[in-house]
Amino acid sequence: MNIEFKETQTFTQWWLWLLLAGLSVIPVMGIYKQLILGEPFGNNPMSDLGLILFSAFVFSLIVLFWVMNLKTEIDQHEIRIQFFPLFVKKQVKWQDVKYAEILNYGFVGGWGIRFWTKYGTVYNTKGNKGLAIELNDGKKFLIGTQKETELQRVLEKILNNRKLSFVPNNKN
C-alpha cells in the first residue's frame, strides 16, 4: 500500500488553549483554597468530593483536547480517517465514491465531529477547507484539511487514474 496523502491534525488554536487554561484556574484555586487552606471556595461551596470530581472533569477535558487528533490517509485504493480518541474510524474504497471535491465549507457549528450538515458528517479540527465526498449510495461526509494544495494534487491524480468524477473547486 503506497500512501499518497497523509495528514494528522490537532487542536492548536491559541484561543482554545487560552480558554482551557483559564478554565483550569477555577479548580486549581478551589482546591488550594478549600482543601489546602481549609476555607470554603465561593459563596455556595461544593463539597470536597464535588470539588475533586469537578476538577477531575475539567482536567480530563483538557487532556482530551491535548490528545485528540484527526488522521487522514489516502492511497490509490481507499480513504482512511481516524478521529482519536473518539474511536471513530472510517475506510472508504474509491470504487464506492461517486464524486469528491475540495472546498471551503465555511463554519459548520464548531470543530470536532458535526452531524447533519449539508456536507453530511464533518470531521475537522480547525479551518474551513476540506475534502467533501459523496458515495454511490448518496451518503456524504467531509474531512477537514490544512494541506489543501497537496490534497488537491493527490485527489486529481487518483481520480484521473481511476476515471472517477472530479468536481473542481467551484461548488460551495
Image (cartoon, helix red, strand yellow):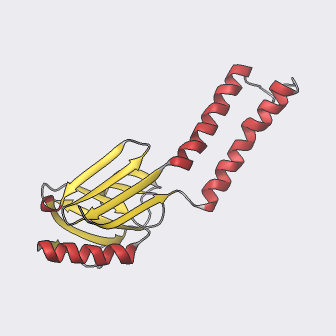
50 in relation to 20, above or below: above
Q: Can you give x and y, in whole percent of width and height, for residue 47 in the image? A: 73, 20
> Could you tell me which quadrant the C terminus lies in?
bottom left
Is residue 49 at all visible to an observer of this figure? Answer: yes
Residue 70 lies in what quarter of the image? bottom left
In the image, 156: left or right of 26? left
Residue, x 64% and y 26% (percent of image)?
53
Q: Can you give x and y, in whole percent of width and height, for residue 79 in the image? A: 26, 59
> Could you tell me which quadrant the N terminus lies in?
bottom left
Residue 104 lies in what quarter of the image? bottom left
Residue, x 77% and y 30% (percent of image)?
31
Residue 137 lies in what quarter of the image? bottom left
Is residue 167 at all visible to an observer of this figure? Answer: no
Q: Can you give x and y, in whole percent of width and height, for residue 136 in the image? A: 12, 58
Count of numbered circles in the view: 0
In the image, 134: left or right of 153? left
Residue, x 38% and y 74% (percent of image)?
148
43 in relation to 131, above or below: above
Q: Can you give x and y, in whole percent of width and height, for residue 61 in the image? A: 57, 41
